[in-house]
Structures are given as C-alpha cells and as structure tokens.
C-alpha cells in the first residue's frame, strides 16, 4: 500500500474506503506512504520483539494498543462508527497484555 500510495495518486485515492482512511489521506496527502511505512515498521518491530519475548516489547505493546483504543474512540467522536470495533479489539489486546501472567512472561516479575 505504501509503494502504491507513493507512486500513484489514483491508488492513494482508492485507499479512501472508510471515514478513517479518508481522514488519513486528508491529513497526509502525498505523504501517506510515509505514514503507512511508519505504522508497518512499528507493528513489524512489535511482532518480532514479542515473538522473541523481549522485555521492552511488553511496554511497547501497551503503548501501541493503548494508542489504538484512543484512536478508535476518536474515530467514533468524529462520526466513524467502526471505531467502536477498533477500540474494542485494541482494548482486548491491551487487557490481555496487562494481565500478570503476560507481564511475568516478558519481564520475569
């Protein structure tokens, strides 16, 4: 998506299939590809570091999914009802990652 967004304005415009993606395109315009690469990189680092059970990945998980909850609620506040689903999924991951067993697995405490 990032490569297509960087190379073709028509491709970039075709990404606007929901209210949230329309806002993304409005905010970032021709730089949408940079945003998509950033998000992809953060999630790839999070996935790899969680797979390797790095201690700092636990905090990163809480931050990323906490931001996801806030983002989902913000979407609802601007009239995008699908934000409820995003907020719920992110909150579920946040709650699971906050559990004592998961924290112990990452931190040893």
Image (spheres, helix red, strand yellow):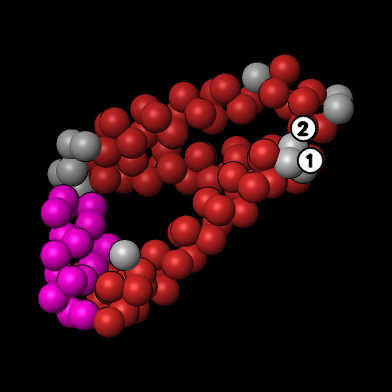
Is residue 40 positioned above or below 101 on the image?
Answer: below
Give the secondary structure at mark 1.
helix
Is residue 77 positioned above or below 94 on the image?
Answer: below
- Residue 89: give x, y in percent of width and height: 39, 29
Residue 61 visible in the displayed image: yes
Q: Quadrant of the C terminus?
A: top right
Q: Residue at x 79, y 23 (%)?
A: 104
Q: Residue at x 35, y 69 (%)?
A: 2
Q: Main secondary structure of the magenta part?
A: helix
Is residue 35 positioned above or below 54 on the image?
Answer: below
Is residue 11 positioned above or below 46 on the image?
Answer: below
Taking depth in this image into account, of 91 and 70 the one nearest to the observer is 91
The part of the image, by quadrant, that contains residue 32 is bottom left
Determine whether label 1 and label 2 are within 8 Å by CB.
yes
Mark with earlier residue (1, 2):
1
Q: Residue at x 74, y 37 (%)?
A: 53
Classify mark 2: residues with Cα within 10 Å, few (<14), some (14-19) or many (20+).
some
Query: Of the numbered discs in the image, which one, if any, rests on residue 55?
Result: 1
- Residue 77: give x, y in percent of width and height: 24, 43
Q: Quadrant of the N terminus?
A: bottom left
Magenta stretch contains residue 23: yes
Query: Of the numbered discs in the image, which one, if any, rests on residue 106?
Result: 2
Give the secondary structure at mark 2.
helix
**Segment tinted magenta in the rendering:** 8-25
Magenta stretch contains residue 61: no
Q: Give left or right: position of 34 versus 55.
A: left
């Amino acid at each position: 998506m990032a490569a297509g967004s960087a190379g073709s304005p028509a491709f970039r415009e075709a990404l606007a299939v929901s209210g949230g993606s329309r806002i993304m395109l409005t905010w970032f315009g021709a730089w949408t590809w940079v945003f998509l690469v950033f998000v992809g990189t953060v999630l790839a680092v999070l996935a790899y570091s969680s797979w390797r059970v790095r201690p700092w990945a636990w905090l990163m998980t809480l931050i990323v999914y906490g931001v996801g909850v806030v983002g989902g609620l913000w979407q609802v506040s601007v009239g995008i009802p699908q934000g409820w689903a995003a907020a719920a999924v992110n909150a579920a991951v946040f709650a699971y990652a906050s559990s004592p067993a998961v924290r112990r697995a990452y931190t040893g405490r």
